[in-house]
Image: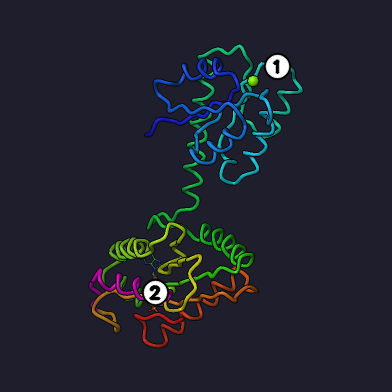
Amino acid sequence: MNQPRILIVDDETSNIELIAEIFMDDHEVLFATDGAKALELAATANPDLILLDVILPGMDGFEICARLKAEPHTTEIPIIFITGRDDIETETSGLALGAVDYITKPINPQIVRMRVSNHIELKRARDRLTQLAATDGLTGLANRRRYDEVLEREVQRHRRSGAPLTIIMLDIDHFKTYNDTYGHLRGDDCLRAIATRIRDSLLRTTDLAARYGGEEFACILPDTGNTEEVTAIAERIRENIMALAIPHQTSPTAPHVTISLGVVTGYCTQNLQPEQFTAAADKQLYLAKSQGRNRHAI
Ligand code: GH3
Ligand code: MG
Ligand code: MG
Ligand code: MG
C-alpha cells in the first residue's frame, strides 16, 4: 500500500514543521500556507486527508473547507481542523461544514497521529465499498448501476455542450448454446475474456465499458460522433472478439464466439433521455441480430 498523503494547511511555517514532524517517516507530507494553494493541491495531488488551520489571512479555514466540500473532486477528502480556537461555537461550525474531526492547539503528537490514522483507514474502507458497489463481480467491469450513473452524467453534458455521445450495446451470439455445450463455468470464463477484450478495445480514459446484464455489455463513448469513426470502433471491438478465437462448435454463426453490436450516436439527439439512448442502441442490436449476427448496426 502506498504511503498515505497528507496535506497540512497553516499560515505559520513553525506549525507546519511541528505537524509534519509527526508524519514525515511514514507519510507523504504536502503543505500550503494559504487558501489558494490549499485548494490547488487538494485538487491536483488528491491527498488522503487534510489538516486545516482555521485562522489564515485571506480565505480562512472554514471557507477552504466549504469550497472543498462543494467540489465533486475533493468532497470525499477527510478534513481535520487543527486550531487554537477552542470555543464550542467555532468547533460546531467546523464540524457542521463537513470536517470529520477538530483538534485544538497545543497539539499532542500521539493524539494527532492516532486520529489521522483512524480517519485515513475509514476513508480507505469507504473507497473500497464505493468501488465494490460500482463493479461487476464476475468480470471486474463497471456494473449496471455505474453504467446508469455515468450515462445520466454524460447525457446531461451532451445536452449542455452538444458534444456527440455514442452508446454501444453488445451481446454474445448464441451464448445459451455455448453454456449448453461447454458448461456454465466455461461460460463464465468466456464472459470474463470477452469483458476484458471489450475494455481493452476502448482507447480513451473517458470511455466506459460495463456489464449491462447476463451476456450483454454496454459502452459509453463521450465526444465521439462521426459515423465513420464510431463504425471503426464498433468493428474494432467485433474483430478483437473474433481474434480471441474462443471455440464455439455449436454456433450457427461461426466456429468461435462472436458478438453483435447496436450503436447509437450523434450530435443532434439532444432531446433523448438516458434510457432512450439505451433503448435506441438496444433496437440497433436487435437489428444486427436479425441481419445475421457477428456484425454491428448503426
Ligand atoms: P442470441 O445470439 O440471440 O443473443 O442468443 P443467446 O443464446 O446468446 O441469447 P439468450 O438470451 O437466449 O441466452 C443468453 C444466455 O446467457 C442464457 C444465460 O444462461 C447466459 N448467461 C447469462 N448470464 C450468465 C452468466 O453470468 N454466466 C453464464 N455462464 N451464462 C450466463
Ligand atoms: Mg493560522
Ligand atoms: Mg446473446
Ligand atoms: Mg442477451
User: Would you name the residue on which mark 1 appears?
Assistant: 86
Q: Which residues are magenta?
A: 229-249
Quarter holding residue 297: bottom left
The quarter of the rendering in which ligand 4 is drawn is bottom left
Q: Is residue 86 left or right of residue 248?
A: right
Percent x, y for residue 146?
51, 57
Q: Is residue 247 above or below residue 128?
A: below
Quarter holding residue 267: bottom right
Name the mark on residue 234. Answer: 2
Percent x, y for residue 278?
54, 72
Main SS of the magenta part reads: helix
Percent x, y for residue 68?
62, 38
Which of pointers 2 and 1 lies earlier in the amino acid sequence? 1
Q: Is residue 175 left or right of residue 245?
A: right
Count of marks placed on residues: 2
Q: Is residue 184 magenta?
A: no
